[in-house]
Image: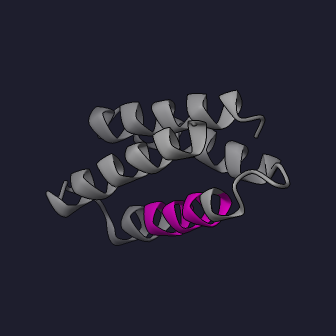
Amino acid sequence: MPARELQEQLDTLREQLEQNPPLTAEEHVHLKELMAQIQAQIELESATPNNNLADGVNLAVERFEVEHPTIAGTLRNIMNTLGSIGI
């Protein structure tokens, strides 16, 4: 089930943030907000696709790609999973 896979990827992202990567306060807040949106979408179990969520994840990938490639990779996985469940 893609929602379960998405939850696992979100958990991975949480674990990465717990390792305290060198993020600015703004980056940290941005990721926390994005994670909350992803969690809300998981809870809805994709009842209504949220294109803004996919756009937000894509922008986060671009933002973190250079300085935080591990986080960006996890966000890419989340993006792929969102696509596979039609979001």
Q: Residue at x 76, y 40 (%)?
A: 87
Q: Residue at x 31, y 64 (%)?
A: 24
Residue range of the region highlighted in magenta in the rendering: 31-41
Is residue 49 a member of the stretch shown in magenta? no
The foreground one among 83 and 47 is 47
Q: Residue at x 64, y 38 (%)?
A: 82
Is 40 left, or right, of 36 in this rendering? right
Residue 26's quadrant in the figure? bottom left
Is 29 left, or right, of 87 in this rendering? left
Is 64 left, or right, of 34 in this rendering? left
Question: x and y percent of residue 4 in the render?
Answer: 50, 45
Magenta-drawn stretch, dominant element (helix, strand or loop)? helix
For residue 65, say whether it is visible.
no
The foreground one among 3 and 10 is 3
Q: Residue at x 82, y 55 (%)?
A: 47
Above or below residue 8? Residue 35 is: below
Is residue 32 a member of the stretch shown in magenta? yes
Instruction: Report the quarter where the N terminus lies.
Output: top right
The foreground one among 78 and 55 is 78
Above or below residue 42? Residue 74 is: above
Question: x and y percent of residue 80 in the render?
Answer: 58, 28
